[in-house]
Amino acid sequence: MPQVNDGDSAGVGARRTTPAAKPKTTSRVRMSAAQRREQLIATGRQLFAERGFDATSIEEVAARAKVSKPVVYEHFGGKEGLYAVVVDREVRALLDRITTALTAGHPRELLEQAALALLGYIEEETSGFRVLVRESPLMSGTANFSSVMNDVAHQVEHILGAEFKSRGYDPKLAELYSQALVGMVALTGRWWLEVRKPRKETVAAHLVNLAWNGLSHLEAKPTLITARRR
């Protein structure tokens, strides 16, 4: 009868033990307070553009930024505070862009530059423009697209006022015409935001064509045709 080697029999069922693998540690880069604030502003900007003020919640902002709700409250005090910062930045960005663009001496070129500046902002900062054109929350003192366009109209008013005076028109009407011109460009811009055709240079050219050729043949004292028939 063959003899069984005890050492061999023990080795059959034995398991080899290997040193336990050390768990991998992922190092997360901690943001500074300033960096976190910028991240939350960018996140809020995107959500307000997508959903509007009322439909956006602090929970959504926190979840998308991967932070807790108290962090958002710590930086902005609430949704209204975050919204105010986002809108204020967009207002300043748009006004700076338009103001910087107005460098020409001829009024027609100024109209072209203003139209291109607004359309360029819509094209390059679409989310920001969407935030501005949405209605501000009720009882909010936050500036919105209407107030921005009103500021732009005041700048155009000074240009038109000088032009009216040199041509013998009543300079007091410059405010009315500036509101009309800026309103035309702004509403066209809102339409172009969705369709994106034709290209912005073509849109600007047609806007200026309508505005300038209309301005160049202004009647000093226009009357309504229906009124003349009475």
Image (cartoon, helix red, strand yellow):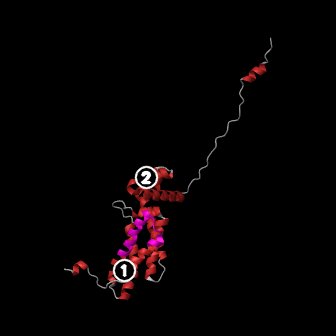
Marked residue nearer the N-terminal end (1 or 2): 2
Query: In the picture, which quadrant includes the C terminus?
Result: bottom left
2 sits to left or right of 157: right
User: Residue 106: within the magenta?
Assistant: no
**Magenta-highlighted residues:** 179-203
Place of residue 19 in the rendered image (x, y in percent of width and height, measured from the top left): 70, 35
Q: Amino acid at mark 2?
A: Ile
The quadrant where residue 192 appears: bottom left
Residue at the image position 61 percent from the left and 47 percent from the top:
26
- Residue indicated by mark 2: 58
- Residue indicated by mark 1: 214
Place of residue 76 in the rendered image (x, y in percent of width and height, measured from the top left): 45, 57
Q: Could you tell me if residue 77 is visible in this image? A: no
Helix, strand or loop at mark 2: helix
Residue at the image position 37 percent from the left and 77 percent from the top:
178
In the picture as drawn, the residue positioned furthest to the left comes out as 230
- Observer-side mark, 1 or 2, equals 1
Query: In the picture, which quadrant includes the N terminus?
Result: top right
Q: Please say if 70 is above or below 103.
A: above
